[in-house]
Amino acid sequence: MYFDLTDEQQAIKSTARDFLAARYKSERIRELAESEHGFERSDWEEMAELGWPGLALPEEWGGQGLGVVELAVLFEELGYALAPTPLLSNTVAGLALATNGTEAQKERWLRPLAAGEARGTVALFDAGTPAAIGEFELEAVAAGDGIVLGGEKVLVMDAAEADFFLVATADGRRHLVEADADGVRVEPETSIDPTRRLYTLHLDGVQIGTEATLNGGQQDYLPVLWRACVAIAAESTGVAQRTMEMAVEYAKDRQQFGRPIGAYQAVSHRCAQMLLETENARSAVYGAAWAADADPDSLPLAASMAKAYASDAGWRVPDASIQVHGGIGFTWEHDLHFFLKRGKANAVTFGDARWHRERVADLVLAAAAEPVPA
Amino acid sequence: MDLSLSPSEQEFRDEVRTWLEENHPGPEPEGSLEEVMAFRREWQGRMHEAGWAGISWPKEYGGRGATLIEQAIFVGEAARQEAPSPANVLGLAMGGPVVIAHGSDEQKQRYLEPILTAEEIWCQGFSEPESGSDLASLKTKAVKDGDEWVVTGQKVWTTFAQYAKWCMLVARTDPDAPKHKGLTYFLMDMEQPGVEAKPLVQITGEGEFNEVFIEEARIPDANVVGGVGNGWTVAITTLMNERAGLAFGAIAQIANSLKRLGKLATETRVNGGTAADDPVFRQRIAQLNIEAETMRLNAYRGLTKTMQVGIPGPEGSLGKWQWADINQRITELALDIEGAYAVLDRGADHAVANGAWQYGFLRSRANSIEGGTTDILKNIIAERVLGLPRLR
């Protein structure tokens, strides 16, 4: 029993903290938030040199072969820095390929993805549907030697300049669609979070061969989803940590009625609540990350718990921080709103808190049938 | 990071599990407090014979010298199996550790063994009617008279006072010193004319706690622990021991409550189905399970940190706050699930689960008051963890 980062994990954390703090100062985040694609290629190349795109991907495909704990360490720091980067979507695409890709697909796409030379993202939800996990409507229509895809996928992260999409169809399968295929077009959407861009992917009679379909059905993508949930929940934990620190610093400095506002219990107790939620989120995240690496049977419950909790904490803590800041926290000029927006966007991505709590209820109520001591 | 038990920890867990399964006597008798105490004394005697009483105490003082993780395993397993409490909870968790940390050799010789055997029960005389959260303002005074101290004052919320031989008493020995400095920690003999314990009836109708009236009680000089004027420091050690020991028992107890809550939900009819099918109840059940899991994981993180640093940090306050909150909300949800039947208490023919949830609902109101109120814990977190300025 040892619930702390190892020296190696701590080193990943420090490297990420230093690198990201140097890259993403406030002015830079604002610049990127207003730029065309929301991130810059030169940053991506540096992250690739650090091995981040392939951090948790198998070594045989050029990844670093590290675990989900290490992935959580990195994503907590990405959230802390509010880094505008397509690393999340790329990681999810990489995990999906590593889990269910064919050897040929891995050779063609996973290897360059892990090296940061090609970038992928996932396209799951169909326009006009409730965008619920696993409920996809796009039909894979058989055509000649392959299939034809026609429809609109919404809420696709970081689609601009992506090299390929993993497109979900009603049968639960995923198909690798290259960005330069005929009939593929991406349109930017306006997200509340300008530091992570969303797009609509138009598929206009896109023809793909059988070799483009990945192995497995929806059930086989759940282990990918749980890992994605841990990563995004870790990011939300970083968002909570950073905004809690901002609130505490401000509460120490800001004077009203002749003393720092942090001396008033209405403020200090709000800060204590922020700490509680941040630490709870962190524990849930690393508990689930450890389960992903060492105890996969407990991962579905642990991941849903982590995602449900961090979904809430990830926006409530920034919101509480805005309240501690008062008027200045509500201005565009202050950075807090970017954190609130990322936290809220994360909360509804990869299943919202309600969806994950429903899964938790399923699992714990099934266990309620087990005997209870007299 | 490794959240599993090591082979040696697993071995220890199995040993504890087997011993408890074979030895713990099942639920406490439903009788008078006297019968319950006799039952607990008997149980503690059995624990002591097998070396499980005072497992955190060093071996040289009759304990097991268990590591923190082993203590956590034992307390957690005992709570999981719903083994009864030993009779001398406060002596084992606070009195013994304080004597070991601050007591003289003579005191160690005199007091430790009877704590382990439950021959002498201990109680804690800290809180006073005018000094609750602001403990250091306490007024009970002790005046030197030859080689004795004469003590007069009143204590309150004193668990087991009616059974106790020894009271861990903090009294003011120097009225002129600043309030934290003028206190001394005594071991007061409860069996003397100047000491009277009266039960306080609480909102559940029971009397777990007492008021203790002290009128010129006498304490020999030899019963000062940690030196005259050091009472605050000694008392703080006691409180830290209290908190560190409780966490893993509380976690297992919450896990049992959540299982019972799940069972209640699956057995209670609501809107043509059961409460376990109701989307609102499902969300609340899930949320409580999630928060209980974060509490469990926080405690393990805290344990790792304590093993690294040596002493439990102020973060323990988070766990106590969270425990009170979760425990209260579990009972609130249970009553909501029971619906109109939630009004029926213990003894009613149609009470659900014999009124267990009604009792739990009422008893848990104290969870955010006893052992440090939630409001004070938030102050501690704000000041000592976050470094926010003090209001005072």
Image (spheres, rainbow, N blue to C red):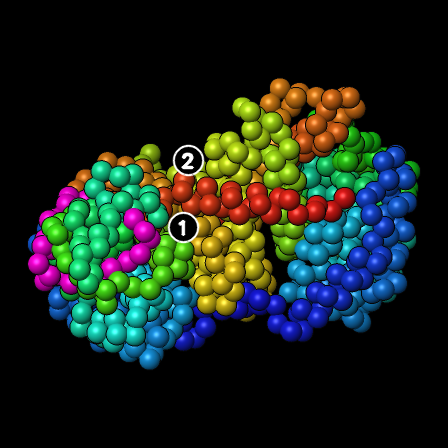
Q: Secondary structure at mark 1?
A: helix
A332 with respect to B152 (left or right): left
Magenta stretch holds residue A197 = yes
Residue at x-position 53% and y-position 34%? B277
* Region of the chain picked out in magenta, as a range: A170-198
Give x and y (percent) for residue B246: 66, 51
In the picture, which quadrant includes the N terminus of chain A? bottom right
Judge the density around disc 1: few (<14), some (14-19), many (≥20) Cα neighbours within 10 Å: many
User: What predominant SS class does the magenta segment belong to?
Assistant: loop
Residue at x-position 75% and y-position 63%? B16
Identify which residue, B284 or B126, lies in the foreground.
B284
Judge the density around disc 2: few (<14), some (14-19), many (≥20) Cα neighbours within 10 Å: few
**In the figure, residue B67 lies in which quadrant?**
bottom right
Task: Name the disc covering residue A266, or none.
Answer: 2
The relative height of residue A47 versus residue A302 in the rendered view (above or below) is: below
Q: CA distance from mark 2 to mark 1?
A: 29 Å
In the picture, which quadrant includes the C terminus of chain A? top right
Residue at x-position 13% and y-position 69%? A42
Residue that carries the numbered disc 1 in the rendered image: A307
- Determine if marks 2 and 1 fall on one subunit: yes
What subunit carries mark 1?
A
